[in-house]
Amino acid sequence: MANSNLPRRIIKETQRLLSEPAPGISASPSEDNMRYFNVMILGPTQSPYEGGVFKLELFLPEEYPMAAPKVRFLTKIYHPNIDKLGRICLDILKDKWSPALQIRTVLLSIQALLSAPNPDDPLSENIAKHWKTNEAEAVETAKEWTRLYASGA
Amino acid sequence: MEVNAILEEKLKKIRSVVGPDLPDSFIVRTLSRNGGDPDEAIKYILENPGFLARPLSVVRTVTSTGARVSTQFMQEDSMESEEEAKPTVQVKEEPGLWLKDRGIENRGVSLDRSKVTGTSKMTLDEFLKLHVMSDEEYSKILEEIPAAVGAEPSAKIHVKEEPVEAIAQSGAGTNARVKEEPDLEVKNRASAKKARSETENFAKSVSSNSSGMQRNGTLSNDGRCKIEDGDFPIESDWFLVGRTVVTAMSTTKGNKLADNEIVNFAFPSSSSRFNAQWIVRFSTKRSGEIGRLPMEWAKCVVPLVNSRKVKILGRCIAAPGSLHIMQEIFLYVSFYIHSSVFSDIDTVTWKLEATHIDSTMYPLLTLFKLLKITPYQKAEFTPEELDSRKRLLKLEDDPDEPTSMLPIVKRRKGSQQFADQNKDDQTLNESSLTKLVGAADMYNLDEMEPPRTLTCDLRSYQKQALFWMSELEKGIDVEKATQTLHPCWSAYRVCDERATSIYVNIFSGESTTKFPTATQMARGGILADAMGLGKTVMTIALILARMGKGCPDNQKSTVNKNVITEKKSQKSRTKARGGTLIVCPMALLGQWKEELEIHSEPESISIFVHYGGDRTNNPEVLSGYDVVLTTYGVLTSAYKSDGEFSIYHRVDWYRVVLDEAHTIKSSKTQTAQAAFTLNSYCRWCLTGTPLQNNLEDLFSLLCFLRVEPWCNWAWWNKLIQRPYENGDPRGLRLIKAILRPLMLRRTKDTKDANGRPILVLPPTDVQTVTCEQSEAEHDFYDALFKRSKVQFDQFVAQGKVLHNYANILELLLRLRQCCNHPFLVMSRGDSQQYANLNKLARKFLESNTNSTTMEPTAPTRAYVEEVVDCIRRGENTECPICMEFADDAVLTPCAHRMCRECLLSSWRTPTCGLCPICRQMLRKTDLITCPSENPFRVDVEKNWKESSKVSKLLECLEQINQSGSGEKSIVFSQWTTFFDLLEIPLKRKRIGFFRFDGKLSQKHRERVLKEFSESKEIKVMLISLKAGGVGLNLTAASNVFIMDPWWNPAVEEQAIMRIHRIGQKRTVRVRRFIVKDTVEERMQQVQARKQRMISGALTNEEVRTARIEELKMLFR
């Protein structure tokens, strides 16, 4: 039933995601629910997450594109804007959502968030504090976590 | 089987006199003692008052010594008896329970009857007497028992290899060596089956508690280990629910169990995974793990014990001498419920989560069922009854009817591309709908005179509706309701009489100790009269007849308030008390307001339209009016931003009316959720099509109406949706039964009590006008067709037809448009509009340079020029929101292009919002319509040529005009671009017309509709189907021109209904235009086929192939 009234836009976006994927990002819809995507994001180079493969899930709600997709990290990650449940603090996923944004742009934004953690708008207070007080150490922890949990196994 | 039935009947008879408290087994035995005569048995029972005493009044001080007698356990037995005879050790229990007999079959070993009889001291009759006796007599016999037991060893029982012979003996005679196989079912058959030897085996029932042993067991024969078989103290906090024998399974072997030995249960931790979480093991102190509980018990016991509200204690009875693995072990298990459940403080209902395996299995209910505790007051209908063929609900059997509706087309994988097509595919047509939900041919309803504040006359069937609606709003009498058990709840009594009744909602599994009254039942229903019968007027009459605010007070005076209602009214005390809230589609907002004003006495009601950009957010304002009108869009956006604290949710409405209620057919959408969560005393759904695509649509309506238990998805799915989809007619019959009291549906064919149609409308005259293409037109069409066919054949060859459904539909779209006018499919681009565009660009750039200083986000000149250039070249861009080529594109002041519709729907308010691309604030008035007057390659105006269809239409219009009858016409098409073309000849021929399509704002819509109905000059209105499909009242016109056939005939039907409805005074002439030898003609065939498909004549597989066939047919 979930796939019945799939809007043309979702079909189009899916086709484009599959035919011309964004670098470092792969997203493929689940077989039984075309609104649910399995996403992999490669940790951006020059970031503590480099070399990591991060799994995410993305779900397009009924109101999409008038409402933002729901995205969550499945892979454990040490990042001030991502909490331990994998929830992401990103304005375009909340109040700054615009229907002109797409799955692709959302995922690119998340990739960018990995490159530029923003401890001033934290979701994970502890990690953010860590980041602010001792960035070098926090980055080391992030690298460690990447090795531990996102080493692509 | 038959014997059982007779027995059952006798049992029932006896029960009717002696009450439900005696156990079956006891009655059966009494029966057999009295020669199977129920009357004798009743007499017997009544003469022995001990039976009828309440459980607690019977103090039993004897154990099941007799059954357990054996040489080895001699010592223990006598000791036990002595101890229990002491007054201090009073083990209370229900008389019946210990009487449960166990048929014990001799297997392989047969006893020589005569010898046994000779040696045993007590006969069965004596034993029975024992149970029947009063306390004094009891103790007398008690003294005898040790003696009897003491004599036991001397009684030699010879075990012979002889054919099985019955021994009707007391347990005192049976030797421990006899392998006992208690058969619980024997209870019912005992008297019938003489071949079975019956032994009284007393289950020693002790209220037991593993932690608080009064007396620990005595030495076992080897003297090394203690057998834990003492009694359990009574704990005041725990009330006995019931006791029963559970057949468990051993997981160990060896000589491990003794009779009456206490077993301790170990429950899986909640972290146990998969099936491990349902394994309840039991062990003895002596030997450790013995076995596990059967799954059916475990599944209900685990969640109950985990809730800490229930505990379970047990001991083994009839222990086998030596255990094998997987051997059956009989445990006598007592269940207790904690008193906190009944205490006054704990008034909240507690609900144990259903097992995840079947979400309609509820632990407490299952426990009651397993314990054979029957409710003393049953729910009006139970899942079993609904599920079984023996149904309480009286459903007439009309076998042909459900099958014609089944199976509804199931959606399958790979068909997702059908997206928009699917909707049409599944729409039910009127007749199937009528069949499904059963438009009653005749309702025997009283009429109710409308209030005098209603200024129009109601027809008789409308007065009936008014009566029906008011009755439903009154609900059942409040006094009565508070004393009536809610139909979904059953009342149970547990063994312990200190406990009050427990009420369990058999559908939701919720339990409470507070009486659930019927007051919280749904008030309202579904007014599903077919289009054009005047649902609006009926509703207005209802509003005027029953004015009210908030939730009426009468509920507060009730004594037995249900918890839920109580909580609600507490919350509501802080809320504003509103009148009637009407939620309708935007297109109908004006019509509602107008009709409310026209049909009510001036100043009889106050109306407030809550819509538009600067609407208030103060619930007090809304509650100040009798009627508040709003749209689904506004309701949804309020809900989206404020959830259940939105302005609408902060008002306690007297009545909520959802017009075109099928808008909420998908229960998961925000719109539906917003509607479900509204607080209201009465709830109404108005819809001509309660079922649009599938049965699930109804679920959403029932959710809104809060019809228990059907608003619970699990039950809906289990009893209706799934059976329906699997072709089981019961699903359908059930939904009909549910709807019968809730839904009023009349069609135009419904007859009144005198057999006359309830509504007489002028006739319709539907004709198909076949047009013949001119040669040039035909050549063009042919070329397009051939090109499309090549592509289609390719898909067929690759076997990818269904994967390319969207592409194929686009091919077809072009062909269909070509039938209307070849210009429609010619590629975009222009030669003549430069001048206009330059003007536009200039205006655009000017307005922007003015504002650059203020707005840093303003686009650069170069960008704007590029965009304008792009428009000039006729290049259409993809709309960033729907990702289609922009239809009715607008240009924002920030020079972004997108569909008008997409942009407006992305805004939270209708007048302004952010640009989706650059987030600049936009006002609706700032939007510039992209030049679309001329999206054609050819300069249509200069090279104007009529297509055959256009000529035919003009011919018809002129004819009407010349006839001087003043009749007005409506022209329907699917494409607004076609109207763009039509404007040219209409203007040239000076035929005045209005256009009504998505571009019109709400205000304009109202004005256009008003002017059209009043104007004497303008007699034609062009309506795009998407804009004017629903709700509009176009009775001013009497001619309908359907320019292009729709995939779905139901949509055409609905369009015609806009004109053919109450208020129409002329014959309605409908002309459908079809171009000969084109895809349109073949679409007609597909439509006919689709009818068959909708009515369920095809199976799923057929439907799939049908799709391909259908397409092949179109490309033939």
Image (spheres, coloured by chain):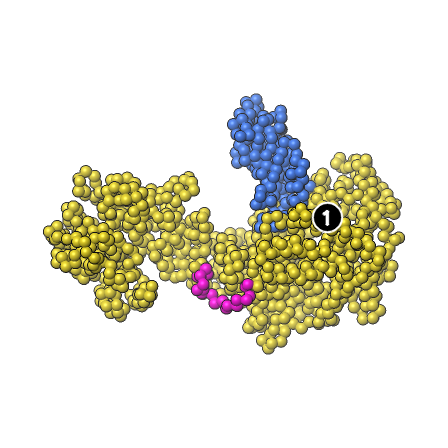
Chain colours: A blue, B yellow
User: In the image as oriented, which residue stretches furthest toward the top?
Assistant: A136
Give the x, y percent position of residue B826: 81, 50
* Magenta span contains residue B388: yes
Q: Is residue B1009 left or right of residue A34?
A: right
- Read off the chain for label 1: B
**Residue at the front extreme, as displayed:** B797
Seen from the viewer's position, the closer of residues B352 and B1115 is: B1115
In the rendering, at what x and y percent does residue B1037 appear? 75, 66
- The residue at the point 39 percent across, 40 percent down is B269
Task: Quickly name the residue at label 1.
Answer: B791
Residue B574, position in %: x, y?
A: 53, 52
Question: Which residue is pictured at 18% across the width and 54% down the height?
Answer: B161
Segment colored magenta: B385-403
> Could you tell me what secondary structure mostly forms the magenta stretch?
loop
Q: As rendered, which of B652 and B978 lies closer to the eye? A: B978
Q: Residue at x 23, y 67 (%)?
A: B34
